[in-house]
Each structure stands twice: as C-alpha cells, then as structure tokens.
Image (tube, rainbow, N blue to C red):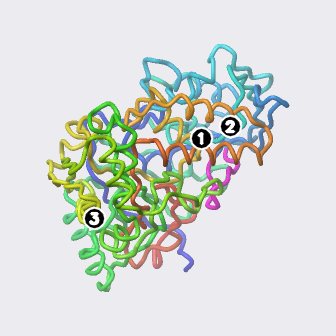
Amino acid sequence: GTPDRGGTLRIARPPASDAETLDPASSLSAYEYLGALYNRLVRVGSDGDLAPDLAESWETDTKARTWTFRLRKGVTFHDGRAFTSADAAYTLRHILDKATASPQAAVLAPLVDPKTLRTPDAHTLVVPLKSPNAEFPSLLTHYNCYVVPDGSAKSVGRTGIGTGPFKLESFTPAGPGRVTAYADHWAGRPVLDAISFYSVADMSARANALLAGQVDLLSQTNLDFATARVVAASNRATVARVKNAQWYVLPMLTTDKPFTDVRVRQAMKLAYDPEHVVKVALQGAGTPGWDNPVPPDDPLHISAHPAHDPDQARHLLKQAGQEGLAVDLYTSAYDPLLTPMALAYQESAKRAGIRIRVKTAAADSYYTQIWMKKPLMATYWYTGRPVDQLFTQIFRSGSSYNETAWSDKDFDSVLDRARAETDATRRRELYGQAQNLVIEKGGAMTPMFADRLVGLSRKVRGYAEHGFEFDYLGIGLKGA
C-alpha cells in the first residue's frame, strides 16, 4: 500500500557497545543509522546488479586497471556543503587509513594506493588499481563505504553528516537516537518526517513492544517461528518475509584437527542433507545451501554441487583415520535459528556415523569467545554482498573475516584471474570455479539460506529490504 506523508517511524534495535560510532568506515552495528544518513558511490539494486548512487556512471580502461567515476551534481551534505570528488577520494583514504581500523580496508588495500587517487574536476574521481579488477565498483557497495565529508574523520562518528535522506538529530551509543527528514536530499524528500531508534536488549522484549504498539519495526531481529505466529495473528502487527536474507554457516576451522584434513571436511559436507536441515530448522522458510555461500538468487550462483552421500562420507572418514568421528558443535541463542540448524545437522549426520555433540554457549559472549576460536560452530551472515566482496572478505587467505582460516592458493589464483578478466562470460566462469573450490575444499558448510521474518506494525507501508537495508525514501506509515 501507499504510505501517507509525514509521521515518525519507531524502530527497536539490539543494543551495541558504548563504542558504537556513526563513522561508516569503522561501524560494526549502526546499520539503521548509516542507511538513513549516508549514500555510497555505488549500491546493489534489488535485482542483485550494481546501481548508481552518488556516482551516476563509471567506466574502466581496457585492462580494468583504472576506474573513472562520474559523480552526481547538485548533491549537498546535511551541513549545506556541496558534495564533490574531494569527498569521494577522502572517503577511500579514510577507509584505507590504518588508524581508522576499517574492516573494509583488508578488501581495498591490496588494490588501492590512496596516494594515487585523482580528482581531475569536482565531479570526477579516478582510481588507479595496483592490479586489474573488473569487479572493483562492487567492492564500494559495502556499508563501510558510505561517503563522508572531506576532513571529517574526527567528527563524523558523532555528527553523522552525510548526503542521505535523513539528518541526525540525536545519537547515543548503545542507546536511543533520532533522525529527521532532509528536505534537500538529491533524490527528493523522504516520505517520513523522522525515525526514532530505541535500544531494546531482549528479542522477546522487542516483540512485546511491537505487539503493544510502542514501536513500528524490529531491526536486526529474525523472529523465531513461534513469535512470528503470535505477531502475525495480532491486530497491531504483522510479519514481512525477506527471501534468502540470511546465509547460515557451520564453519570448520581448517587450522584445527580434525578439519586440517580436506577428506574430513568433505565427509562433513557429504554426511548431511541440506534439504532435511531446511525442512526441520526452517520449517521450509528458506533454500538449501548445498555448501555454496553464493545465494541462489545471485546472478553468478552456480547450481552444481555434490549430492548428499553418507556412505561416501563414511569412506572418506575411514581413509582419513577418523572412523566414528565425534566433534563438538557450538551454538547459542544469539540468533533463533542457530540451535535448530545445529540439531538438524546433528540428526542428519548420524547416518554417516558422525556423532555431533551440540554445546550451547552464552549469547552475549558468543562472538568474542566462540566465533573463530572453536573448531566447529554455528553462525550467520546477511546476504547482499557481491561475489567478489564475499569471496575476498570471508574466504581469501589471510582475510580478518576468514572464519575458517582456509588458505588455498588455487582459490586465491582463480579469484585474481576472475578480477582481472574483462570478458563478462569468462569472468562468470571463473567465479563459478571459485564456488566449486569452496564447495569441494573449503571449511565452510552452508546448510541453508533463510528467509528473515521481520516484525512490523500493520501501519507500515513501503517496506522493501535488500541486504539488511531498506528503502528509507519510500518507507512510511498509513494514517501518519
């Protein structure tokens, strides 16, 4: 339905730490603020392809070594300053500055020397690369790449000054905040007058606030099925279903035994049936992953994969000297689907003689004490990353987010070749090879892609989500 103009959208979000910042380059939690306050040069469209944002167009030379971005004119920051190429260049330098500690620096630093960036005029940014990359613009779609004003490193984490559809009124790290409509936004004024953010620690407390009419939208919250049924049955709230919005993983640390042996990793994958996991853990609300981290609706996804084969899994374990393998699988209540996924895997893998001991760890310390520390655990990521970003950030040797510590020269080489390939058909084939290597040799099991169940008021209109972000311009309220 069509929203009425005006009104305030009230969003309940999980609390972050007191160190939470609005500086996009180093932010790890303030997603809802970032999308309201900033724009990128390039964004990912709802169809999964790249779309213009602050850059109207971009082109490269014949070798994909130098990229030129033509920037939008008539754009202003919230403080009235005109957006120019100096801001775009500064944003990249800020991400690459070691003092910023940006997670995206590890992706961009091998490609971009900040000293070589050029701004021949106020609306042109030239980015020479250290090595060819035909997918470079896709790396600028990450949420760490929102554009900030030139020279703003020391202040932007507090001021939130950007070019986005809303400007900051107040912000408290791990606490409440508010943004108001920016009337001079280059794409037009947003439908809403304001968005108020509330920090609510407990998922059930967030759901109760929604049912009581105290908030309109639950962000960063995937409702469990029981809660979703209660919400959908109420007269105040309902559930939006975002298809394949979350990618669920069982990472095996390839530096820890028994997962140092590729045969054990292959056996762990062949031992379970992803369709069984989707049926049991998701009650059908998702898609089997078949150990490929590239979402099924991504244009570069390949559908080929080994079949579920518990007998072959037993054979591989016997070859590796791991007959009767028994391992701990850590999970927590951090996300409502982690434990159902772990239990479904445990049940399915029994057929291959693998004994899984499911261990429940505390939710509040799960990502500091368990993630990337225990040999086998359950986790999830939001989908929406372009393939090169996904592979570079989570699977390439040495990446800080490489949660399996997998290091494979063949994979890195294929990724380099794919980046340098300017022929689109050949590049697609190479990214297909990269997917096959992750499936066959990597340490990440991907049982499923889950639809996210988002709780929202029945008054909300125009909620359209992609890659854990929604349309801030179009969202609104009925009867605002």
The kind of residue tagged 2 is: Ala
The kind of residue tagged 1 is: Asp
Distance from label 1 to label 3 (Cα)?
A: 36 Å
Residue located at (53% from left, 58% from top): 305
Q: According to the image, label 2 marks what residue?
A: 418
Residue located at (51% from left, 50% from top): 166
Q: According to the image, label 1 marks what residue?
A: 388
Residue at the extreme top: 115
Residue numbers of the magenta segment: 43-53
Q: Are marks 1 and 2 in contact (CB under 8 Å)?
A: yes
**Residue 283 among those drawn in magenta:** no
Mark 1 or mark 3: which is in front? 3
Distance from label 1 to label 2 (Cα)?
A: 9 Å
Q: According to the image, label 3 marks what residue?
A: 351
The kind of residue tagged 3 is: Arg
User: Residue 475: x and y, percent?
Assistant: 52, 66
Describe the element under mark 3 as helix, strand or loop. Answer: helix
Describe the element under mark 1 as helix, strand or loop. Answer: helix
Check the image and report above or below for 326 versus 253.
Answer: below
> Counting other residues with Cα less than 10 Å from the Cα at mark 1, is it few (<14), some (14-19), or many (20 or more)?
many
Check the image and report above or below for 383 versus 236.
Answer: above
Image quarter (top left, top right, bottom left or bottom right) of the N terminus: bottom right
371 left or right, relative to 154: left
Residue 170 appears in the picture as rendered? no
